[in-house]
Image: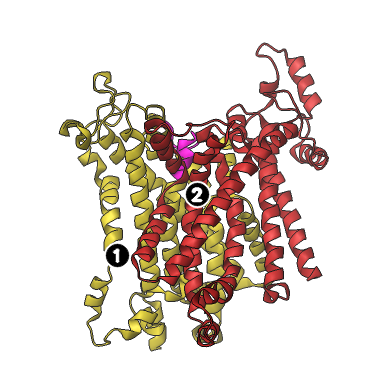
Chain colours: A red, B yellow
């Protein structure tokens, strides 16, 4: 188990390193950032001075090492647009993204999983058919469009909920549904197929033959054993939700990291872009690491691999 | 010899199912003509959804009732025909009076071209990587597969957004984003398949007969990989259309005044209180494309290779 944990940890660190390299390269390749830092009528000397001040006169590998050295201390430089430390800016937005992602995640689990169990235990019924059609069509709907359709229906036409922004419980409802839409469908499909497989197994048949009530069979014997693929997928999904937040937050003017990232890209505010991409990617990697470890605990075959 | 020739037919059409029968096919009367069986299990819904999109994509220029970029303020925000509009503008018009049907048709060719090239490039690159890893094994395999893991460990939307930010918005950006997003899954699947194929007797025989590495790959491995790659590509095509639309919607993809479904939705978002149809209609086109290609991919998978259910 220790070996397994160490390997996963090493891989997580390596992935983080790769992300830092990619974000660094990306922001440096997108043009000479010096001109964002100086006035339009700056003299050649002033430009040179700014280059030296920000280390932009050095070679790229040297710049990267300097960047990495600062990054591990949490120093990404000041946001060019807002003039405050980029990491502080990102961290101040982070709770919003986490709140939205977790709400979406919990919603997807609470709706998708029971629906999947229901569909599997009533295979072939109208419930099963309806749930399966919903899953199929739901997975084909792009999240940003679902978001706009929800705005159109519940905010513009019915006026029940706000179009966007933040501030009250009502503000989180639409973005959370839009975010979890795909996941609800995916959880439902996965739970259904996983349950069907388990319901067909010998031990479930034995549990029935022993005279257990159907509910006990389904919850205790079938569902518990269909959990492993669900846990893997749930972890991956939480990561995907964090990524999907970028689009959804922009639509609903939700003040999270994703919205900050998109606006920073528009303004070529590269310290903020780097900080927000790195923070999001770190969370993604951390969640995946957690899932891998949990998976190792749940399934002895994995950790002894 | 007979098994070899059978496995080498392009896409392994039909005959693969004799080697690995799909569970439900076991019950089908074996004497039933293959052709009729194929017709009965044809992906009717998928074709029904995809045909209009494909026709729009390929023959769009003959079908557009209006110039998709022609601005005509007198005709702004006209409703579609099923909401009280006229046949002149069957799906209504946007805030600049541009015909939505024409823009939808024009956008289909853009969306399909972008999705197709993105997936094709990802498929070619990913297959090359997977094949190299599976064939050479050893340190090369270890390195390439760690790269794949790495790619899968980074949220794809972040990479796409980052890339779009670097080279600016446009067709090339979206195609490159799609390639970066999708290559790793090909590499992973192709490597696995290559490992299996390398165990086959005919590969060992070819090696004994003195065939070169390239000859073995070209004649014995690559043709047998085709069905996996085709299935994966079909399943990804829909996702690619979705990602393209999302990037374009965020302003990072196809740029105005070109027509694209994502652009129509982002334009329509601003006017949805007056004209609900502008963001709604292109979204339906996206759902049709994604759903159609998912269903077609599922069907192809069952048909070509039932072992691939994990894709």
In the image, residue A169 sits, relative to residue B139, either above or below, namely above
Any part of residue A142 in sight: yes
User: Residue B252 appears at what percent x and percent y?
Assistant: 50, 36
Q: Which mark is residue B178?
A: 2
Callout 2 secondary element? helix
- Labels 1 & 2 near each other (Cβ < 8 A): no
In the image, residue B70 sits, relative to residue B148, either above or below, namely above
Callout 1 secondary element? loop
Which of marks 2 and 1 precedes in the sequence? Answer: 1
Magenta-highlighted residues: B244-256
User: Residue A132 appears at what percent x and percent y?
Assistant: 39, 62
* In this picture, residue B292 sits left or right of residue B140: left
User: Residue A12 appears at what percent x and percent y?
Assistant: 73, 56
Residue in front for this viewpoint, B241 or B63: B241
Q: Crowding at label 1, few (<14), some or many (≥20) Cα neighbours within 10 Å?
A: some
Cα distance between the residues tagged 1 and 2: 26 Å
Q: Quadrant of the N terminus of chain B?
A: bottom left
Query: Which quarter of the picture shows residue A46?
Result: top right
Q: Crowding at label 2, few (<14), some or many (≥20) Cα neighbours within 10 Å?
A: many
In the image, residue B253 sits, relative to residue A181, either above or below, namely above
Residue in front for this viewpoint, B280 or B246: B280
Residue in front for this viewpoint, A219 or B209: A219
Any part of residue A187 in sight: no
Name, please, the residue furthest toward the left: B87
Residue at the image point whose x is 19% and y is 32% from the top: B84
User: Residue B235 appears at what percent x and percent y?
Assistant: 43, 60
Residue at the image point whose x is 33% and y is 43% from the top: B108
Q: Which mark is residue B43?
A: 1
């Amino acid at each position: 188990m220790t070996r397994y944990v160490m390997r996963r940890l090493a891989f997580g660190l390596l992935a983080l390193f790769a992300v830092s390299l990619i974000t660094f390269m990306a922001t440096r390749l997108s043009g000479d950032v010096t001109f964002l830092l100086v006035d339009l009528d700056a003299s050649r000397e002033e430009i040179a001075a700014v280059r030296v001040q920000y280390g932009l006169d050095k070679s790229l590998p040297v710049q990267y090492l300097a960047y990495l050295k600062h990054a591990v201390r949490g120093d990404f430089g000041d946001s060019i647009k807002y003039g405050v430390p980029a990491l502080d800016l990102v961290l101040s937005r982070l709770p919003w993204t986490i709140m939205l992602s977790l709400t979406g995640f919990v919603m997807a689990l609470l709706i998708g999983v029971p629906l999947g169990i229901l569909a599997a235990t009533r295979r072939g019924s109208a419930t099963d058919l309806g749930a399966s059609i919903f899953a199929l069509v739901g997975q084909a709907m792009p999240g940003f469009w679902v978001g706009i359709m929800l705005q159109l229906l519940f905010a513009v036409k019915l006026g029940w909920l706000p179009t966007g922004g933040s501030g009250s419980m009502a503000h989180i409802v639409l973005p959370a549904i839009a975010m979890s839409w795909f996941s609800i469908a995916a959880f439902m499909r996965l739970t259904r197929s996983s349950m069907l497989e388990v319901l067909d197994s010998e031990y479930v048949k034995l549990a029935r033959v022993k005279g257990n009530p159907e509910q006990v069979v389904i919850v205790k014997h079938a569902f518990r054993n269909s959990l492993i693929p669900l846990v893997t997928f749930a972890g991956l999904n939480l990561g995907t939700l964090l990524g999907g937040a970028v689009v959804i937050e922009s639509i609903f003017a939700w003040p999270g990291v994703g919205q900050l990232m998109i606006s920073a890209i528009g303004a070529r505010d590269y310290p903020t872009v780097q900080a927000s991409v790195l923070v999001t990617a770190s969370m993604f990697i951390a969640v995946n690491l957690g899932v891998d470890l949990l998976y190792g605990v749940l399934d002895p075959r994995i950790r002894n691999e | 010899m007979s098994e070899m020739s059978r496995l080498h037919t392009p896409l392994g059409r039909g005959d693969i199912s004799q080697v690995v029968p799909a569970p439900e096919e076991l019950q089908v009367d074996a004497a039933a003509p293959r052709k009729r069986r194929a017709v009965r299990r044809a992906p009717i819904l998928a074709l029904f959804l995809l045909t209009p999109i494909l026709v729009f994509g390929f023959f769009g220029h003959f079908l557009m009732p209006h110039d998709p970029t022609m601005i005509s303020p007198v005709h702004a925000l006209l409703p579609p025909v099923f909401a009280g509009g006229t046949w002149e503008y069957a799906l209504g018009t946007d805030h600049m009076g541009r015909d939505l049907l024409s823009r939808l048709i024009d956008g289909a060719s853009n969306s399909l071209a972008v999705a197709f090239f993105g997936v094709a490039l990802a498929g070619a690159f990913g297959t090359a990587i997977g094949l190299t890893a599976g064939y050479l094994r050893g340190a090369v395999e270890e390195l390439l597969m760690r790269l794949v893991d790495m790619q899968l460990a980074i949220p794809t939307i972040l990479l796409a957004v980052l890339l779009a930010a670097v080279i600016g918005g446009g067709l090339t950006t979206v195609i490159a984003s799609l390639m970066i997003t999708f290559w790793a899954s090909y590499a992973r699947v192709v490597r696995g398949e290559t490992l299996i194929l390398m165990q086959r007797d005919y590969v060992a025989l070819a090696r004994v007969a003195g065939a070169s590495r390239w000859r073995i790959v070209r004649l014995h491995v690559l043709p047998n990989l085709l069905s996996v790659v085709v299935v994966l590509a079909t399943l990804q095509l829909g996702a690619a259309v979705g990602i393209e639309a999302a990037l374009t919607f965020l302003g990072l993809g196809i740029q105005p005044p070109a027509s694209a479904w994502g652009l129509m939705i982002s334009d329509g978002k601003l006017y949805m209180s007056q004209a609900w149809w502008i963001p709604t209609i292109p979204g339906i086109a996206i759902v049709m494309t994604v759903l159609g290609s998912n269903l077609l991919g599922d069907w192809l998978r069952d048909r070509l290779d039932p072992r691939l259910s994990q894709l």
